[in-house]
Amino acid sequence: MNPHIILIVIALYFGLLLLIAKFTAGKGDNQTFFTANRQSPWYLVAFGMIGASLSGVTLISIPGEVGNIGFQYFQLVIGYLAGYAVIAFVLMPVYYKRSLISIYTYLGDRFGRPAYKTGAVFFLISQTIGASFRLFLAAMVLQIAVFSHYNIPFELSVAITILLIWLYTYRSGIKTIVWTDTLQTVFMLLAVALTIVILLGKMDLSVPQAVKSLSDSELTTVFNWDWKSPYHFFKQFLSGAFIAIVMTGLDQNMMQKNLTCRSLADAQKNMVTFSLTLLPANLLFLFMGALMYLYIQQMGLNFTDSHGFMLNQATNQYVHTDALYPLLAMNYLGGLAAMVFIVGVIAAAFSSADSAMTALTTSFCIDIMNIKELQDPRQKKTRYQVHIAVSVVVMATIVVFKALNNSSVINAVFTMAGYTYGPLLGLFSFGLFCKRMPKTRLIPVVAIVSPIITFLINSYSEQLLNGYRFGFELLLLNGFLTFLGLWLLPQQSRDWTKVPASF
Protein backbone atom coordinates (compact mmCIF):
# COMPACT_ATOMS: atom_id res chain seq x y z
CA MET A 1 0.00 0.00 0.00
CA ASN A 2 1.32 3.44 -0.95
CA PRO A 3 2.40 5.19 2.29
CA HIS A 4 1.61 8.61 0.75
CA ILE A 5 -2.06 7.66 0.34
CA ILE A 6 -2.20 6.29 3.89
CA LEU A 7 -0.67 9.53 5.20
CA ILE A 8 -3.28 11.59 3.36
CA VAL A 9 -6.09 9.45 4.78
CA ILE A 10 -4.68 9.84 8.31
CA ALA A 11 -4.42 13.61 7.85
CA LEU A 12 -8.03 13.81 6.66
CA TYR A 13 -9.15 11.64 9.58
CA PHE A 14 -7.49 13.86 12.16
CA GLY A 15 -8.76 16.93 10.35
CA LEU A 16 -12.29 15.62 10.86
CA LEU A 17 -11.63 15.04 14.58
CA LEU A 18 -10.25 18.57 14.98
CA LEU A 19 -13.30 19.95 13.19
CA ILE A 20 -15.59 18.14 15.63
CA ALA A 21 -13.52 19.50 18.53
CA LYS A 22 -13.97 23.03 17.20
CA PHE A 23 -17.75 22.76 17.01
CA THR A 24 -18.11 21.08 20.42
CA ALA A 25 -15.65 23.29 22.31
CA GLY A 26 -18.16 25.58 24.00
CA LYS A 27 -16.61 27.61 26.82
CA GLY A 28 -13.79 25.13 27.32
CA ASP A 29 -14.09 25.53 31.10
CA ASN A 30 -13.51 22.82 33.70
CA GLN A 31 -17.20 21.94 33.96
CA THR A 32 -17.27 21.28 30.22
CA PHE A 33 -13.99 19.32 30.29
CA PHE A 34 -14.93 17.09 33.24
CA THR A 35 -18.72 16.60 32.84
CA ALA A 36 -19.78 18.04 29.43
CA ASN A 37 -22.18 20.12 31.56
CA ARG A 38 -24.17 16.88 32.01
CA GLN A 39 -26.00 17.47 28.72
CA SER A 40 -24.89 14.50 26.57
CA PRO A 41 -27.64 12.59 24.70
CA TRP A 42 -27.74 9.07 26.19
CA TYR A 43 -27.93 7.29 22.82
CA LEU A 44 -24.81 9.10 21.61
CA VAL A 45 -22.90 8.03 24.72
CA ALA A 46 -24.10 4.42 24.33
CA PHE A 47 -22.93 4.14 20.73
CA GLY A 48 -19.60 5.88 21.37
CA MET A 49 -18.84 3.59 24.30
CA ILE A 50 -18.73 0.60 21.95
CA GLY A 51 -15.55 1.90 20.35
CA ALA A 52 -14.08 2.97 23.67
CA SER A 53 -14.66 -0.45 25.25
CA LEU A 54 -13.43 -2.52 22.30
CA SER A 55 -10.19 -0.67 21.41
CA GLY A 56 -7.40 -1.62 19.03
CA VAL A 57 -6.53 -4.60 21.23
CA THR A 58 -9.94 -6.12 20.47
CA LEU A 59 -9.69 -5.34 16.76
CA ILE A 60 -6.34 -7.13 16.43
CA SER A 61 -6.22 -9.69 19.25
CA ILE A 62 -9.73 -11.18 19.43
CA PRO A 63 -9.96 -12.20 15.74
CA GLY A 64 -6.44 -13.66 15.94
CA GLU A 65 -7.27 -15.83 18.95
CA VAL A 66 -10.16 -17.52 17.13
CA GLY A 67 -7.65 -19.97 15.64
CA ASN A 68 -6.80 -21.30 19.12
CA ILE A 69 -10.03 -20.99 21.13
CA GLY A 70 -12.78 -20.52 18.56
CA PHE A 71 -15.64 -18.34 19.81
CA GLN A 72 -14.98 -19.15 23.49
CA TYR A 73 -14.25 -15.47 24.12
CA PHE A 74 -17.99 -14.90 23.65
CA GLN A 75 -18.59 -16.62 27.01
CA LEU A 76 -16.87 -13.60 28.58
CA VAL A 77 -19.08 -11.24 26.57
CA ILE A 78 -22.23 -13.01 27.84
CA GLY A 79 -21.00 -12.36 31.38
CA TYR A 80 -20.68 -8.67 30.57
CA LEU A 81 -24.49 -8.39 30.51
CA ALA A 82 -24.73 -9.31 34.20
CA GLY A 83 -21.96 -6.86 35.06
CA TYR A 84 -23.55 -3.99 33.15
CA ALA A 85 -26.86 -4.64 34.92
CA VAL A 86 -25.06 -4.18 38.27
CA ILE A 87 -23.53 -0.93 36.99
CA ALA A 88 -26.86 0.43 35.76
CA PHE A 89 -28.96 -0.41 38.81
CA VAL A 90 -26.50 -0.51 41.72
CA LEU A 91 -23.53 1.77 41.00
CA MET A 92 -25.10 4.51 38.88
CA PRO A 93 -27.72 5.48 41.47
CA VAL A 94 -24.86 5.96 43.97
CA TYR A 95 -22.86 8.13 41.57
CA TYR A 96 -25.79 10.26 40.43
CA LYS A 97 -27.12 10.77 43.95
CA ARG A 98 -23.83 12.48 44.83
CA SER A 99 -23.38 14.28 41.48
CA LEU A 100 -19.84 12.92 41.35
CA ILE A 101 -17.18 14.12 38.93
CA SER A 102 -14.64 11.51 40.03
CA ILE A 103 -16.20 8.23 41.14
CA TYR A 104 -13.40 7.70 43.68
CA THR A 105 -14.85 10.54 45.73
CA TYR A 106 -17.29 7.89 46.97
CA LEU A 107 -14.43 6.06 48.70
CA GLY A 108 -13.59 9.27 50.55
CA ASP A 109 -17.20 9.67 51.67
CA ARG A 110 -17.37 6.08 52.83
CA PHE A 111 -13.94 5.36 54.30
CA GLY A 112 -12.01 8.61 54.47
CA ARG A 113 -9.05 10.19 52.71
CA PRO A 114 -6.58 7.23 52.69
CA ALA A 115 -9.08 4.96 50.86
CA TYR A 116 -9.98 7.77 48.48
CA LYS A 117 -6.35 8.35 47.50
CA THR A 118 -5.69 4.60 47.29
CA GLY A 119 -8.54 4.06 44.82
CA ALA A 120 -7.43 7.00 42.69
CA VAL A 121 -3.80 5.83 42.59
CA PHE A 122 -4.77 2.30 41.53
CA PHE A 123 -6.88 3.79 38.74
CA LEU A 124 -4.07 6.10 37.59
CA ILE A 125 -1.63 3.20 37.36
CA SER A 126 -4.10 0.97 35.50
CA GLN A 127 -5.16 3.60 33.00
CA THR A 128 -1.66 4.85 32.29
CA ILE A 129 -0.56 1.35 31.36
CA GLY A 130 -3.79 0.54 29.50
CA ALA A 131 -3.89 3.75 27.47
CA SER A 132 -0.20 3.47 26.63
CA PHE A 133 -0.57 -0.10 25.43
CA ARG A 134 -3.55 0.70 23.22
CA LEU A 135 -1.67 3.54 21.60
CA PHE A 136 1.46 1.39 21.37
CA LEU A 137 -0.38 -1.04 19.07
CA ALA A 138 -1.63 1.77 16.84
CA ALA A 139 1.76 3.50 16.81
CA MET A 140 3.52 0.28 15.78
CA VAL A 141 1.11 -0.27 12.89
CA LEU A 142 1.48 3.34 11.71
CA GLN A 143 5.25 3.17 12.06
CA ILE A 144 5.46 0.10 9.82
CA ALA A 145 2.86 1.27 7.30
CA VAL A 146 3.76 4.96 7.04
CA PHE A 147 6.41 6.65 9.15
CA SER A 148 9.25 4.20 8.49
CA HIS A 149 9.02 5.06 4.78
CA TYR A 150 9.85 8.68 5.66
CA ASN A 151 12.66 7.68 8.06
CA ILE A 152 10.75 9.18 10.98
CA PRO A 153 11.87 7.53 14.24
CA PHE A 154 9.28 5.71 16.34
CA GLU A 155 9.62 8.13 19.25
CA LEU A 156 8.81 11.12 17.01
CA SER A 157 5.82 9.39 15.41
CA VAL A 158 4.45 8.63 18.90
CA ALA A 159 4.94 12.26 19.93
CA ILE A 160 3.06 13.45 16.83
CA THR A 161 0.20 11.02 17.47
CA ILE A 162 -0.21 12.10 21.10
CA LEU A 163 0.03 15.77 20.13
CA LEU A 164 -2.86 15.31 17.71
CA ILE A 165 -4.96 13.64 20.42
CA TRP A 166 -4.09 16.45 22.82
CA LEU A 167 -5.16 19.07 20.27
CA TYR A 168 -8.70 17.76 19.96
CA THR A 169 -9.19 17.03 23.68
CA TYR A 170 -7.35 19.75 25.61
CA ARG A 171 -10.10 22.38 25.39
CA SER A 172 -13.38 20.58 26.04
CA GLY A 173 -12.28 17.12 27.13
CA ILE A 174 -15.16 14.71 27.66
CA LYS A 175 -17.67 16.87 25.77
CA THR A 176 -15.63 16.50 22.58
CA ILE A 177 -14.89 12.83 23.22
CA VAL A 178 -18.58 11.90 23.46
CA TRP A 179 -18.89 13.05 19.82
CA THR A 180 -15.53 11.84 18.48
CA ASP A 181 -16.07 8.39 20.04
CA THR A 182 -19.30 8.08 18.06
CA LEU A 183 -17.47 8.83 14.83
CA GLN A 184 -14.64 6.47 15.68
CA THR A 185 -17.03 3.64 16.57
CA VAL A 186 -18.59 4.02 13.11
CA PHE A 187 -15.18 3.78 11.43
CA MET A 188 -14.08 0.79 13.51
CA LEU A 189 -17.24 -1.27 12.89
CA LEU A 190 -17.19 -0.24 9.24
CA ALA A 191 -13.60 -1.50 8.97
CA VAL A 192 -14.61 -4.90 10.34
CA ALA A 193 -17.66 -5.13 8.06
CA LEU A 194 -15.66 -4.18 4.96
CA THR A 195 -12.91 -6.67 5.85
CA ILE A 196 -15.56 -9.40 6.08
CA VAL A 197 -16.91 -8.41 2.65
CA ILE A 198 -13.39 -8.48 1.17
CA LEU A 199 -12.65 -11.92 2.68
CA LEU A 200 -15.93 -13.34 1.38
CA GLY A 201 -15.15 -11.95 -2.06
CA LYS A 202 -11.65 -13.45 -2.07
CA MET A 203 -13.09 -16.87 -1.22
CA ASP A 204 -16.12 -16.44 -3.51
CA LEU A 205 -18.50 -17.22 -0.64
CA SER A 206 -21.85 -15.80 0.41
CA VAL A 207 -22.59 -15.23 4.09
CA PRO A 208 -24.77 -18.40 4.38
CA GLN A 209 -22.06 -20.45 2.64
CA ALA A 210 -19.39 -19.08 4.98
CA VAL A 211 -21.55 -19.78 8.04
CA LYS A 212 -22.11 -23.38 6.87
CA SER A 213 -18.38 -23.93 6.26
CA LEU A 214 -17.48 -22.51 9.67
CA SER A 215 -20.20 -24.40 11.55
CA ASP A 216 -18.54 -27.66 10.55
CA SER A 217 -15.21 -26.59 12.10
CA GLU A 218 -13.93 -25.92 15.62
CA LEU A 219 -13.46 -22.25 14.76
CA THR A 220 -16.97 -21.41 15.98
CA THR A 221 -16.94 -23.43 19.23
CA VAL A 222 -18.48 -21.24 21.94
CA PHE A 223 -18.79 -23.27 25.15
CA ASN A 224 -16.02 -24.96 27.13
CA TRP A 225 -16.94 -27.30 30.01
CA ASP A 226 -13.43 -28.42 31.06
CA TRP A 227 -13.15 -27.08 34.63
CA LYS A 228 -9.33 -27.08 34.52
CA SER A 229 -9.28 -24.85 31.45
CA PRO A 230 -9.02 -21.07 31.86
CA TYR A 231 -11.83 -20.89 29.27
CA HIS A 232 -14.39 -22.93 31.24
CA PHE A 233 -17.85 -21.38 30.81
CA PHE A 234 -18.53 -20.45 34.42
CA LYS A 235 -15.02 -19.01 34.85
CA GLN A 236 -15.51 -16.90 31.74
CA PHE A 237 -19.07 -15.85 32.62
CA LEU A 238 -18.22 -14.77 36.17
CA SER A 239 -15.01 -13.13 35.00
CA GLY A 240 -16.92 -11.26 32.30
CA ALA A 241 -19.44 -9.97 34.83
CA PHE A 242 -16.77 -8.71 37.22
CA ILE A 243 -14.51 -7.38 34.45
CA ALA A 244 -17.46 -5.29 33.25
CA ILE A 245 -18.09 -4.03 36.78
CA VAL A 246 -14.50 -3.00 37.48
CA MET A 247 -13.35 -1.91 34.02
CA THR A 248 -16.51 0.10 33.37
CA GLY A 249 -18.37 0.69 36.61
CA LEU A 250 -15.28 1.32 38.79
CA ASP A 251 -13.26 2.96 36.03
CA GLN A 252 -13.22 6.76 35.78
CA ASN A 253 -12.51 6.55 32.06
CA MET A 254 -15.75 4.74 31.19
CA MET A 255 -17.96 6.20 33.92
CA GLN A 256 -16.99 9.78 33.09
CA LYS A 257 -18.94 9.37 29.83
CA ASN A 258 -21.97 7.95 31.63
CA LEU A 259 -21.94 10.78 34.13
CA THR A 260 -22.35 13.32 31.31
CA CYS A 261 -25.94 12.15 30.69
CA ARG A 262 -28.74 14.47 31.74
CA SER A 263 -30.22 12.17 34.40
CA LEU A 264 -29.89 8.80 36.09
CA ALA A 265 -32.70 7.43 33.90
CA ASP A 266 -30.84 8.49 30.75
CA ALA A 267 -27.59 6.98 32.02
CA GLN A 268 -29.35 3.68 32.74
CA LYS A 269 -30.90 3.63 29.26
CA ASN A 270 -27.43 4.29 27.88
CA MET A 271 -25.90 1.37 29.80
CA VAL A 272 -28.63 -1.13 28.89
CA THR A 273 -28.48 -0.15 25.21
CA PHE A 274 -24.69 -0.27 25.17
CA SER A 275 -24.60 -3.74 26.77
CA LEU A 276 -27.06 -5.20 24.25
CA THR A 277 -25.31 -3.75 21.20
CA LEU A 278 -21.97 -5.07 22.44
CA LEU A 279 -23.11 -8.66 21.80
CA PRO A 280 -23.52 -8.40 18.00
CA ALA A 281 -20.45 -6.14 17.81
CA ASN A 282 -18.25 -8.82 19.39
CA LEU A 283 -19.80 -11.51 17.19
CA LEU A 284 -18.76 -9.42 14.20
CA PHE A 285 -15.13 -9.44 15.40
CA LEU A 286 -15.21 -13.20 16.00
CA PHE A 287 -16.80 -13.90 12.62
CA MET A 288 -14.06 -11.87 10.92
CA GLY A 289 -11.43 -13.90 12.78
CA ALA A 290 -13.00 -17.19 11.72
CA LEU A 291 -13.09 -16.01 8.10
CA MET A 292 -9.40 -15.11 8.24
CA TYR A 293 -8.50 -18.64 9.33
CA LEU A 294 -10.83 -20.12 6.72
CA TYR A 295 -9.06 -17.95 4.12
CA ILE A 296 -5.53 -19.09 5.01
CA GLN A 297 -6.73 -22.71 4.99
CA GLN A 298 -8.41 -22.41 1.58
CA MET A 299 -5.49 -20.49 0.07
CA GLY A 300 -2.97 -22.93 1.53
CA LEU A 301 -0.92 -20.13 3.09
CA ASN A 302 1.99 -21.32 5.23
CA PHE A 303 3.61 -18.60 7.28
CA THR A 304 7.09 -18.90 8.71
CA ASP A 305 8.49 -17.36 11.86
CA SER A 306 9.75 -14.39 9.82
CA HIS A 307 6.13 -13.28 9.55
CA GLY A 308 5.53 -13.60 13.29
CA PHE A 309 2.22 -15.44 12.96
CA MET A 310 2.62 -19.22 12.50
CA LEU A 311 1.31 -22.62 13.54
CA ASN A 312 3.37 -24.39 16.20
CA GLN A 313 3.40 -28.00 15.02
CA ALA A 314 4.36 -29.33 18.45
CA THR A 315 1.38 -27.82 20.28
CA ASN A 316 -0.94 -27.40 17.27
CA GLN A 317 -1.52 -23.84 18.47
CA TYR A 318 -1.09 -20.64 16.50
CA VAL A 319 1.48 -18.24 17.94
CA HIS A 320 1.80 -14.46 17.59
CA THR A 321 -1.87 -14.36 16.59
CA ASP A 322 -1.92 -10.55 16.93
CA ALA A 323 0.05 -10.46 13.68
CA LEU A 324 -2.59 -12.27 11.60
CA TYR A 325 -4.96 -9.40 10.77
CA PRO A 326 -2.15 -6.92 9.94
CA LEU A 327 -0.35 -9.61 7.92
CA LEU A 328 -3.37 -10.45 5.76
CA ALA A 329 -4.64 -6.89 5.37
CA MET A 330 -1.30 -5.38 4.41
CA ASN A 331 0.00 -8.18 2.18
CA TYR A 332 -2.72 -10.49 0.85
CA LEU A 333 -6.14 -8.84 0.66
CA GLY A 334 -5.38 -5.84 -1.55
CA GLY A 335 -5.04 -2.08 -1.20
CA LEU A 336 -8.60 -1.44 -0.02
CA ALA A 337 -8.22 -3.96 2.81
CA ALA A 338 -4.96 -2.31 3.89
CA MET A 339 -6.60 1.12 3.97
CA VAL A 340 -9.63 -0.21 5.85
CA PHE A 341 -7.34 -1.88 8.39
CA ILE A 342 -5.29 1.29 9.00
CA VAL A 343 -8.39 3.42 9.54
CA GLY A 344 -9.92 0.74 11.78
CA VAL A 345 -6.80 0.56 13.97
CA ILE A 346 -6.63 4.34 14.30
CA ALA A 347 -10.32 4.59 15.18
CA ALA A 348 -10.22 1.70 17.65
CA ALA A 349 -7.04 2.80 19.40
CA PHE A 350 -7.83 6.49 19.63
CA SER A 351 -11.46 6.04 20.72
CA SER A 352 -10.17 4.40 23.89
CA ALA A 353 -6.88 6.28 24.33
CA ASP A 354 -8.27 9.83 24.05
CA SER A 355 -10.93 9.22 26.72
CA ALA A 356 -8.35 7.46 28.91
CA MET A 357 -6.05 10.50 28.78
CA THR A 358 -8.98 12.77 29.62
CA ALA A 359 -9.98 10.52 32.52
CA LEU A 360 -6.39 10.50 33.82
CA THR A 361 -6.38 14.29 33.71
CA THR A 362 -9.74 14.42 35.50
CA SER A 363 -8.74 11.97 38.23
CA PHE A 364 -5.38 13.63 38.90
CA CYS A 365 -6.94 17.11 39.04
CA ILE A 366 -9.89 16.13 41.25
CA ASP A 367 -8.51 13.26 43.34
CA ILE A 368 -4.85 14.11 43.78
CA MET A 369 -4.60 17.90 43.40
CA ASN A 370 -8.09 18.77 44.68
CA ILE A 371 -8.41 21.39 41.95
CA LYS A 372 -11.77 22.62 43.28
CA GLU A 373 -9.95 24.43 46.09
CA LEU A 374 -8.07 26.63 43.61
CA GLN A 375 -9.30 29.96 42.25
CA ASP A 376 -11.10 29.82 38.86
CA PRO A 377 -8.29 31.14 36.61
CA ARG A 378 -5.81 28.83 38.34
CA GLN A 379 -8.08 25.80 37.90
CA LYS A 380 -8.04 26.03 34.11
CA LYS A 381 -4.28 26.60 33.95
CA THR A 382 -3.67 23.64 36.26
CA ARG A 383 -5.88 21.41 34.13
CA TYR A 384 -3.90 22.34 31.01
CA GLN A 385 -0.64 21.56 32.79
CA VAL A 386 -1.89 18.20 34.06
CA HIS A 387 -3.21 17.27 30.61
CA ILE A 388 0.22 17.99 29.11
CA ALA A 389 1.95 16.00 31.85
CA VAL A 390 -0.39 13.02 31.27
CA SER A 391 0.44 13.13 27.55
CA VAL A 392 4.17 13.10 28.30
CA VAL A 393 3.84 10.18 30.74
CA VAL A 394 1.82 8.14 28.23
CA MET A 395 4.41 8.85 25.52
CA ALA A 396 7.26 7.78 27.81
CA THR A 397 5.43 4.55 28.72
CA ILE A 398 4.92 3.71 25.04
CA VAL A 399 8.63 4.21 24.37
CA VAL A 400 9.41 1.83 27.26
CA PHE A 401 7.11 -0.81 25.71
CA LYS A 402 8.95 -0.42 22.43
CA ALA A 403 12.35 -0.77 24.11
CA LEU A 404 11.29 -3.98 25.88
CA ASN A 405 9.62 -5.29 22.69
CA ASN A 406 8.68 -8.55 24.34
CA SER A 407 5.35 -10.31 23.85
CA SER A 408 5.43 -11.57 27.44
CA VAL A 409 5.56 -7.96 28.63
CA ILE A 410 2.51 -7.15 26.53
CA ASN A 411 0.63 -10.13 27.97
CA ALA A 412 1.67 -8.98 31.43
CA VAL A 413 -0.07 -5.65 30.81
CA PHE A 414 -3.44 -7.42 30.68
CA THR A 415 -2.60 -9.58 33.66
CA MET A 416 -1.67 -6.47 35.62
CA ALA A 417 -5.20 -5.13 35.10
CA GLY A 418 -6.47 -7.98 37.27
CA TYR A 419 -4.06 -6.99 40.02
CA THR A 420 -4.75 -3.25 39.93
CA TYR A 421 -8.55 -3.41 39.57
CA GLY A 422 -8.98 -6.12 42.22
CA PRO A 423 -8.50 -3.73 45.16
CA LEU A 424 -11.03 -1.33 43.61
CA LEU A 425 -13.55 -4.17 43.38
CA GLY A 426 -12.96 -5.06 47.03
CA LEU A 427 -13.14 -1.46 48.25
CA PHE A 428 -16.35 -0.53 46.42
CA SER A 429 -18.17 -3.79 47.20
CA PHE A 430 -17.24 -3.56 50.90
CA GLY A 431 -18.37 0.07 51.02
CA LEU A 432 -21.69 -0.68 49.32
CA PHE A 433 -22.69 -3.86 51.13
CA CYS A 434 -21.08 -3.69 54.59
CA LYS A 435 -21.61 -1.22 57.41
CA ARG A 436 -18.32 -1.96 59.15
CA MET A 437 -15.81 0.88 59.35
CA PRO A 438 -12.23 -0.50 59.24
CA LYS A 439 -9.24 1.45 60.55
CA THR A 440 -8.74 4.09 57.87
CA ARG A 441 -4.95 4.18 57.94
CA LEU A 442 -4.74 0.40 57.36
CA ILE A 443 -6.88 0.34 54.20
CA PRO A 444 -3.96 1.13 51.81
CA VAL A 445 -2.00 -1.77 53.36
CA VAL A 446 -4.81 -4.21 52.51
CA ALA A 447 -5.03 -2.82 48.97
CA ILE A 448 -1.30 -3.47 48.45
CA VAL A 449 -1.04 -6.86 50.19
CA SER A 450 -4.06 -8.41 48.39
CA PRO A 451 -2.51 -8.28 44.87
CA ILE A 452 0.74 -9.75 46.27
CA ILE A 453 -1.11 -12.72 47.79
CA THR A 454 -3.08 -13.10 44.53
CA PHE A 455 0.18 -13.26 42.57
CA LEU A 456 1.59 -15.97 44.86
CA ILE A 457 -1.59 -18.07 44.65
CA ASN A 458 -1.63 -17.75 40.87
CA SER A 459 2.03 -18.77 40.61
CA TYR A 460 1.46 -22.06 42.49
CA SER A 461 -2.18 -22.79 41.66
CA GLU A 462 -1.51 -25.95 39.62
CA GLN A 463 0.47 -27.51 42.49
CA LEU A 464 -1.92 -26.36 45.21
CA LEU A 465 -5.25 -26.86 43.43
CA ASN A 466 -4.85 -30.14 41.56
CA GLY A 467 -3.94 -28.63 38.20
CA TYR A 468 -6.35 -25.69 38.35
CA ARG A 469 -5.19 -22.73 36.27
CA PHE A 470 -6.49 -19.23 36.83
CA GLY A 471 -7.72 -17.14 33.92
CA PHE A 472 -9.47 -13.79 34.18
CA GLU A 473 -10.99 -14.90 37.49
CA LEU A 474 -7.78 -13.67 39.15
CA LEU A 475 -9.71 -10.42 39.41
CA LEU A 476 -12.36 -12.12 41.58
CA LEU A 477 -9.72 -13.63 43.84
CA ASN A 478 -7.98 -10.29 44.26
CA GLY A 479 -11.26 -8.50 44.99
CA PHE A 480 -12.28 -11.19 47.50
CA LEU A 481 -8.95 -10.96 49.34
CA THR A 482 -9.30 -7.17 49.54
CA PHE A 483 -12.87 -7.54 50.86
CA LEU A 484 -11.74 -10.14 53.41
CA GLY A 485 -8.81 -8.00 54.50
CA LEU A 486 -11.09 -5.01 55.11
CA TRP A 487 -13.46 -7.25 57.11
CA LEU A 488 -10.62 -8.50 59.32
CA LEU A 489 -9.27 -5.03 60.07
CA PRO A 490 -10.08 -3.59 63.50
CA GLN A 491 -12.98 -1.16 63.43
CA GLN A 492 -12.90 2.49 64.35
CA SER A 493 -15.71 4.61 65.71
CA ARG A 494 -17.56 6.93 63.36
CA ASP A 495 -20.69 9.05 63.45
CA TRP A 496 -22.87 6.96 61.10
CA THR A 497 -25.36 9.80 60.66
CA LYS A 498 -22.71 11.50 58.53
CA VAL A 499 -22.07 8.50 56.30
CA PRO A 500 -23.86 8.77 52.93
CA ALA A 501 -26.81 6.41 52.70
CA SER A 502 -25.42 4.55 49.66
CA PHE A 503 -25.27 1.12 51.15
Image (spheres, rainbow, N blue to C red):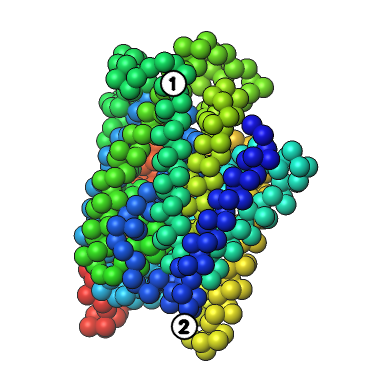
Q: Secondary structure at mark 2?
A: helix
Residue 271: quadrant of the picture: bottom left
The single residue placed furthest to the right in the displayed view is 151
Tag on residue 372? 2
Residue at image point 25% right, 70% down: 263
Image: 287 above or below 123: above
Residue at image point 25% right, 51% down: 273
Between marks 1 and 2 in the image, the one whose residue lies nearer the viewer? 1
Q: Which of the marked residues, 1 or 2, is nearer the chain's N terminus?
A: 1
Percent across and percent down for residue 220 are 33, 23
Question: In which quadrant is the C terminus drawn?
Answer: bottom left
Is residue 293 something one can see in this rendering? no
Percent across and percent down for residue 498 are 26, 83
Amino acid tagged 1: Gly
Tag on residue 201? 1
Image: 1 above or below 177: above
Residue at image point 30% right, 35% down: 75
Q: Work out whether residue 128 or residue 161 is closer to the camera in this orientation and state it.
A: 161
Residue 403: quadrant of the picture: top right
Q: Work out whether residue 429 or residue 69 is closer to the camera in this orientation and state it.
A: 69
Q: Secondary structure at mark 1?
A: helix
